[in-house]
Image (tube, rainbow, N blue to C red):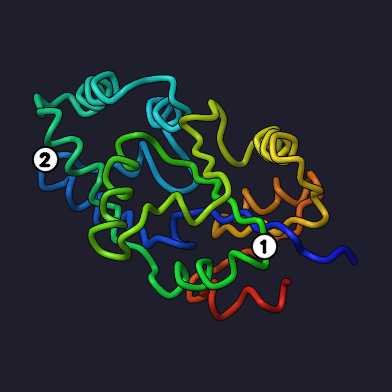
Amino acid sequence: MAAIKNLIFDLGNVLYDIDFKKMNAAFESLGIEGIDNHFTLHKSNQLFLDLEMGFINEPTFCEGVRGLVKLPLTNEQIIYAWNALLVGFRKNSIQWIKDNNIRFNTFLYSNTNQIHCDHFLPQFEKEVAHYPFESLFKTPYYSHKMGMRKPDPKSFVYLLEKEGLTAGETLFIDDNEPNIIAAESVGLKVLHLKEGMRVERDIEVYL
């Protein structure tokens, strides 16, 4: 069995807590019922997929949301509700990465979008540490900059080839089972970080 040399971390509910209930409540406060019919962890309206793959920008996204919900909301109201699912960083998990960066080549691969990046990147330096979040990783990969997203197996192959990584020497950590299955399909070692698990407690047995 090949030794693990590389780590690829998901962000949401791995290094950063997200809560779809908070987002749903924020949209409900604006008069929108059932936003989870359009966007959840496991299914998404094409509008949200397009945002996460960088095919549309913030104004186009906001116009699309207004079209979905048939309400005259401002861009600011939509962005506020959209960002409500962003809770905060798991500081102990971040510290584990910082402490182990010499042991491994460390990467980030997140399905996200520019709106959320504009929120959580400054949040890190305000609430966690006085250095950029992205400096924890050799390379951060975001779906909206790649033009592809998990669980597309091609996205994992793209990352491996771009970085020159051997799949069998690389551990991918994610909370979403379809992403884990896709990563395994291209030969990556995987850690399915289920509810209640934490990187700093549970990763060592996989290394």
Which residue position is annotated with label 1?
104
Q: Is residue 72 above or below residue 202?
A: above
Who is closer to the viewer here, 27 or 138? 138
Instruction: Residue 83: give x, y in percent of width and height.
Output: 25, 46
Is tag 1's residue or tag 2's residue first in the polypeptide sequence?
A: 2
Who is closer to the viewer here, 204 or 65? 204
Q: Is residue 122 above or below residue 57?
A: below
Who is closer to the viewer here, 204 or 33? 204
Q: Is residue 192 above or below residue 114?
A: below
Which one is in front in this view, the residue at disc 1 or the one at disc 2?
1
Question: Does residue 67 appear left or right of residue 103 in this picture?
Answer: left
Residue at the spot 74% in from the left edge and 56% down from the top edge: 170
To which quarter of the image does residue 47 belong? Answer: top left
Quarter of the picture holding the N terminus: bottom right
Residue at the spot 75% in from the left edge and 35% down from the top edge: 161
Q: Secondary structure at mark 1?
A: loop
Quarter of the picture holding the C terminus: bottom right
Instruction: Residue 98: give x, y in percent of width and height.
Output: 50, 67
Q: Amino acid at mark 1?
A: Phe
Which residue position is annotated with label 2?
31
To which quarter of the image does residue 153 belong? Answer: top right
Label 2: how many Cα within 10 Å (few below 14, some 14–19, many 20+): few
Please tell me how many numbered marks the rendered image carries.
2
Instruction: Residue 71: give x, y in percent of width and height.
Output: 12, 27
Question: Does residue 86 appear left or right of residue 197 in this picture?
Answer: left
Q: Amino acid at mark 2?
A: Gly
The answer to whether marks 1 and 2 mark residues whose Cβ atoms lie closer than 8 Å is no
Residue at the spot 59% in from the left edge and 64% down from the top edge: 101
Question: Does residue 9 appear left or right of residue 154 in this picture?
Answer: left
Instruction: Residue 82: give x, y in percent of width and height.
Output: 25, 42
Q: Secondary structure at mark 2?
A: loop
